[in-house]
Image (tube, grey):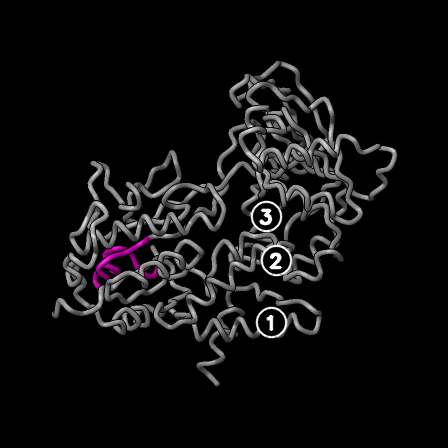
Amino acid sequence: MSSTRPLRVAIVGAGPAGIYAADILSKTDLDVSIDLFERLPAPFGLVRYGVAPDHPRIKQIIVALHKVLSRGDVRLLGNVDYGVDLKLDDLRQFYDAVIFSTGAIRDAALPVQGIDLDGSYGAADFVSWYDGHPDVPRTWPLEAKEVAVLGAGNVALDVARILAKHTKDLMPTEIPANVQEGLEASPVTDVHVFARRGPAQVKFSPLELRELGHVPDVDIVVYPEDYDFDEGSMAAVESSNQTKQVVKTLTDWTLVDPATQSASRRIHLHFLHAPTEITGDDGKVTGLRTERTALQGDGTVRGTGEFHDWPVQAVYRAVGYFGSPLPEIPFDELKGVISNREGRVVDMDGDHLPGVYATGWIKRGPVGLIGHTKSDASETIRHLVEDVTGVGDGGDVATGDLTGGRTATQADPQAVLDFLADRGVDVVEWSDFEVLDAHERALGEPHGRERIKVVPREEMLDVAKRRASS
């Protein structure tokens, strides 16, 4: 086995984090061959299946990701499920290094009484449904007139907006047909968003919040008694232009005369309310109980013992995402991330597993915007290059051993394809996805839409593989 062959690297997860890592790695001084594995038949992860369909500006990130995969120097191997179709020991046969970028797709837990009642949902599951994720049911129970959304971030705003928005205003987007039908039948009139802290502590982005005020036939209702600004709040406003913009938008809404609000649907924003119990009858959600909180000057809150009951028939928790453990990979159950040190995966003793790395949300948790994964990937790739070349502490890679780190015993790129074929895996490569991509665009064209997503996995595979049979 020659030591001068390209370094073989597998990246597991073809969302933004994985594609950014592939792009950065391809531009290093290393002679490298990169395969990008994806569990689904389509790449792009969070951008395709986690961004609301009425946010085309954010979805435009796909354009840059598309360019990386279309260059031809990074090979996409879609419809390959790590932990089922292959595991770490299998990957080690074919690759010298493995980077995990599997993201965080589960809902974080919210330990309140009644959380398991019928009508209590995780926002991550709902987002996957309205974004046409192929692994979730085609229908969603939309029977509530009054809904509570728990959370103070952009996902909470997305959930509230999609629930309240009239379907006709979603038609220009890539919303799948089954989602359109479900939302069309929804009887919702009021969506209540609850944040346990004050207006200066919420994590809404200014643009997302402003957009909320421009949804047709939906009024934004706020409550002046929920607006409290202590010393810590004022310091937060003065130190962050983003916080200042958010607070201004929220404060402007307090000046709206309720008599002028006549929309058929309403989004209510409640601050300083912590959920304490989801109440129910006969196993179904009938209400939400919250405790009024008070700011303590440092951004935290305490309970006041004053409780409020809200009649709602559904509750969505949007309190954050959480990573999922992967077979044979050390996992931090408390943080929901792969155990790692600056991207180097470590075992229980804190020792680096040779050749194993992590990037993105599965590395650092579900914080930051999509673009933040670039710097995150840079850190991981820097350590991988250091480990392979023997150059550390920011030294010049060119002075290291650029032919080191070759450990794979079956380094021919065809070997992994043969392995997957023997296991009956129908691999979706980039040329296959291009067929699916063109098909979705063609579906949307007669309706003046960029695309209409193909949803069932079987149909996605059938479309993608038409190239092979034609």
Amino acid at dot 1? Arg
- Please give the label number shown on residue 56: 2
Taking 466 as reference, is 157 left or right? right
Give the residue number, with chain letter if any, for mark 3.
126
Tell me, yes or no, if residue 379 can be seen here.
yes
Quadrant of residue 270 within the rendered picture:
top right
Quadrant of residue 445 within the rendered picture:
bottom right
Q: Residue at x 49, y 73 (%)?
A: 434
Taking 46 as reference, is 417 left or right? left
Amino acid at dot 2? Pro
Q: Does the stretch in magenta take in 91?
A: yes
Q: Residue at x 57, y 33 (%)?
A: 115
* Residue 120, position as x, y percentages in the image: 60, 38
Furthest residue to the bottom?
Answer: 470
Q: Above or below — where is 93 with respect to 199?
A: below
Give the residue number, with chain letter if any, for mark 1.
441
How far apart are the two marked residues, 1 and 2, measured between alpha carbons?
14 Å
Q: Earlier in the sequence, mark 3 or mark 1?
A: 3
Camera-near label (3 vs 1) is 1
The residue carrying pointer 3 sits among few (fewer than 14), some (14 to 19) or many (20 or more) residues within 10 Å by Cα, namely some
**Residue extent of the magenta highlight:** 84-99
Q: Does the stretch in magenta take in 127?
A: no
Q: Are marks 1 and 2 in contact (CB under 8 Å)?
A: no
Q: Residue at x 49, y 46 (%)?
A: 369
Taking 48 as reference, is 72 left or right? left
